[in-house]
Amino acid sequence: MRVADGMVFDILLRYDRLRSEQLKRSTEELSSGKSILKPSDNPVNFARSLRFQRFIEKIERFSRNIDLTDNTLKMAETSMTSAINLLQEARVRIIQVLNTGTLNGEDAKVLADYFRNVASYIVNMGNTKVGDSYIFGGVKTQSAPFDSDGTYNGETVETSVPVADGVSVNTNFNGADYFGVNRVSNRITVVEILNRIADIIEAGDLERLHTETVSVDLGDGVEDLKLLDAFDKGLSHIEAYRSILGTQQRVVEDIKTQNDAVAVHFKELKSKIEDADYTEAIAEYEKAKTAYQALLAAITQTQNLSLLNYFK
């Protein structure tokens, strides 16, 4: 029985589409480097790869948030450390003044200026900015949180961003807490005491340094404290919150290290699932190309077939 020319061409055309698809597939694998090009290639592995990708994107969002907060945390910690270092030096001078019976006019002026300058420096540290934003005003970031006398004008509400599941880090800070604002006067406690000491020195009544009291409330109730005790309480409060910042910084650094390691791990797992084996892909490409070329040759030969060829 003779096979009709039409049937032969139909068969060849079907094989042509098949070989063409195989060649196209191999080419796409080589160009993309992926063995899974669409869900139907391997539904199970495609779903696993998709889950891994979503997890990687989540980790990368956490890492971006860490980068966003890193500079803010460092600036906040640096500002508070600078303030604490100067306040500790000022404390030594306060004790010296308390042990001094009298001061001449020039010495009194120098000491008073010193304490006012320290107070001004603490206010400046409280008004630290990162870029165009004040970081110690809570969510109120576009205006200075502290007046020149240490009065707090910021907000108590803070904002934070997630850096890991269940872990968030501040992007701004409630300066009333971090700088020890006295709830009675709404001024930074140490600034209030330093300015009070300067006033007393300028007035020339050094005995008041021993007897003067200040009502202080740092969130644990009102206490009437002598000047040095009030200063120490304000300083200890700032030191405690500086420690909180330092802990946050270490936690964030550890989380970033962990996030980076986890992201690399899941990228490797995703790669194993979906990346093409180049050696195998090249071999498949060569096989597909050879088969397709053979098919084209067969089609060319078939086009010349005729029953008359057998009667020559």
Image: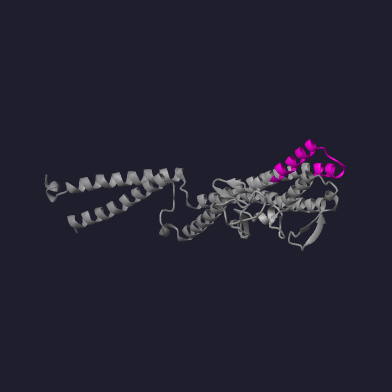
Q: Nearer the viewer, residue 68 or 225?
A: 225
Question: Quarter of the image holding residue 214?
Answer: bottom right
Q: Position of residue 78 (x, y in %)?
A: 67, 44
Specify how the rendered protein is coloured. one colour
What residue span does the magenta drawing correspond to? 91-119
Q: Is residue 65 left or right of residue 79?
A: left
Nearer to us in this view, 92 or 31 = 92
Q: Residue furthest bottom?
A: 221
Q: Quadrant of the C terminus?
A: top left
Furthest residue to the top? 106
Is residue 2 visible in the rendered image? The answer is no
- Residue 254, horizontal then vertical, whole percent: 66, 49
Name the image quarter holding the N terminus: bottom left
Task: Specify whether residue 305 is in view.
Answer: yes
Q: Is residue 290 left or right of residue 268?
A: left
Residue 116 position, x and y percent, is 72, 44
Q: Residue at x 78, y 51 (%)?
A: 231
Q: What's the residue at 44%, 51% (across, down)?
A: 35
**Magenta span main SS:** helix
Q: Is residue 117 magenta?
A: yes
Q: Nearer the viewer, residue 223 or 260?
A: 223
